[in-house]
Amino acid sequence: MATAETVNWIKKAQDRITRLGSHTVRVGVTGLSGAGKTTFITSLINQLENHQRGLLARRAPFDRLTSVRWQREGVTRPFPYLEALGALASSPAQWPSSTADLARVVIDLQFRPEGLLKSLQGNRSLRIELLDYPGEWLLDLPLLGLEYGQWCEQMQALLDSEPRQSLAGDLRDRLRNIDPAAVHDPALLSQLTADWTAFMLRCRTEGGLSRNQPGRFLLPGSGIAADMLMFVPLLSANRYSEGPAGSWWAQCKERFNYYRDFVVKGFYDAHFRQLDRQILLVDMLTPMQAGQAALADLKLALEEVMGSFRYGRNSLLQRLFSPSISRMAICSTKVDQVAPAQQRSLQQCLEDLVTDSISEVRHGGVEVQGFPLAAIRAADQEGETMIGGLVGQTAFIRYQPVTVPSHLPLDLKFAGPSLLHLRPPSGLHRNEPFPHFRMDELAGWILEGRQP
Ligand code: GDP
């Protein structure tokens, strides 16, 4: 008799074979809020649409590309490409609105055939499907392996240390003072849930912290009702706590279980297992500017996010979903903010931050490659200085480029760069390729091994 593991393995091998022969590449694009997902996808579609004029024109297989069609009709939750273009083309140019939900992009490409058969064969087609989703949703992955009481213990430990202790203010005491076995008060629970969400938001905006759970409290996504997000960690509870029906414990535990089993697991079930490749975008510069605590938190958040790409033989993910992501690109974004000679150092700092996670992802059989990217180049170097425009202003300014270390110190302590908030360059138009750094390399990576 075949064991469950063998059946799983055979199913996965069959899936892989079907995918290799298929003409669709399914690519997930994720990153924490502000990482640059929306801008990245906008630029990627723009580079493909303008393949005859940008850097893609000189890169195989795009030099054989004859037509590109970005599909809008019949796509559920289409990516707002036209809205993003509208913001970029306004005066002064604005960045598009950030990703707060799942969105899809379908791009059909047609290529001239190559080699001896080219006169006999018609055009070859290939479809790229991009799934853009907030990385915050992946921070919830560990919840799949947790009981409610264990989650309360973890949150207690987080709120016992700075900077979260101060950011939580009196919310920490209010949650600690609740007796898990007492009858729960629905109005107070609703208030505490709102306060927990506001606390998570402060962690993100004031503390520069990334690891904020439950992820959907900040970015619910469509189809999620407020009722599904009505629980908080009881800070005096632990894995041995109990409470009768109607108690705080019973109520919060029931909602936590629903969130874990339907919201979190539902996302992995419906979308994640379909993906062939994954792009992970990371803004390193903002936490480097915020300092050691923000970097340490980003490290933990990325380790949790990358947990979704760790497919050791008996991993939780392998058992639950048998995912088939075989390649991952990890990209530091917005590298146009540093001088071109420093862009690789920025990518190195990112890879230093998550060295262990990268090894573990590779160990699970996923090929990992790094790209320092700028989806849209907002600044140019001229001699020793940089030149760019600031958000909300049409004029350009000249400034000294920020410097980053060539490696991240192990204790994450160093004088962080001081950044300017640059706006996109003026004069961007849908029918011209946007200036960028390495979007062409990344586009090549998407098609590698699937060339028509
Ligand atoms: P998302 O939340 O991951 O979708 O991130 P966005 O694409 O909305 O980007 C967040 C912010 O980062 C934007 O509003 C810009 O300020 C900045 N940004 C994004 N991409 C770039 C880039 O390529 N270069 C520069 N200089 N800034 C960028």
Image: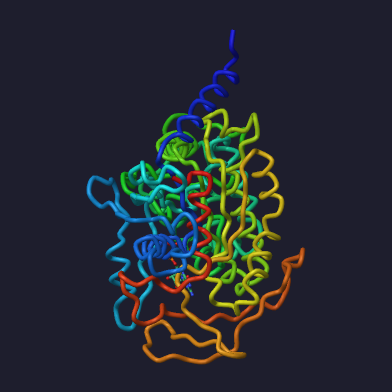
Q: Position of residue 267 (x, y in %)?
A: 42, 40
Observer-nearest of 290 and 25: 25
Horizontal side, residue 352 vs residue 64: left or right: right
Q: Nearer the viewer, residue 11 or 301?
A: 11
Q: Which residue appears at 66% of the width and 61% of the height? A: 296
Which residue extends farthest left?
A: 73
Residue 411 placement, left or right of 187: right
Q: How many marks?
A: 0
Of residues 402 and 71, the one drawn nearer to the viewer in this rendering: 71
| Residue located farthest toward the top when viewing the structure as drawn | 1
Picture colour scheme: rainbow
Ligand 1 occupies quarter: bottom left
Q: Residue at x 41, y 60 (%)?
A: 41
Quadrant where the C terminus is found in the figure: top left
Asked whether residue 370 is in view, the answer is: yes
Above or below: residue 442 compared with residue 115: below
* Residue 66 occupies quadrant: bottom left
Q: Quadrant of the N terminus?
A: top right
- Determine whether 286 is above or below 8 in the image: below
53 lies left or right of 214: left
Identify the residue at horizontal 51%, vertical 64% (top origin). Answer: 204
User: Picture coordinates of residue 129 (x, y %)?
Assistant: 39, 47
Q: Is residue 182 visible?
A: no
Please provide percent x and percent y for residue 170: 53, 61
Query: What percent of the width, then of the height, locates residue 223?
Result: 31, 44
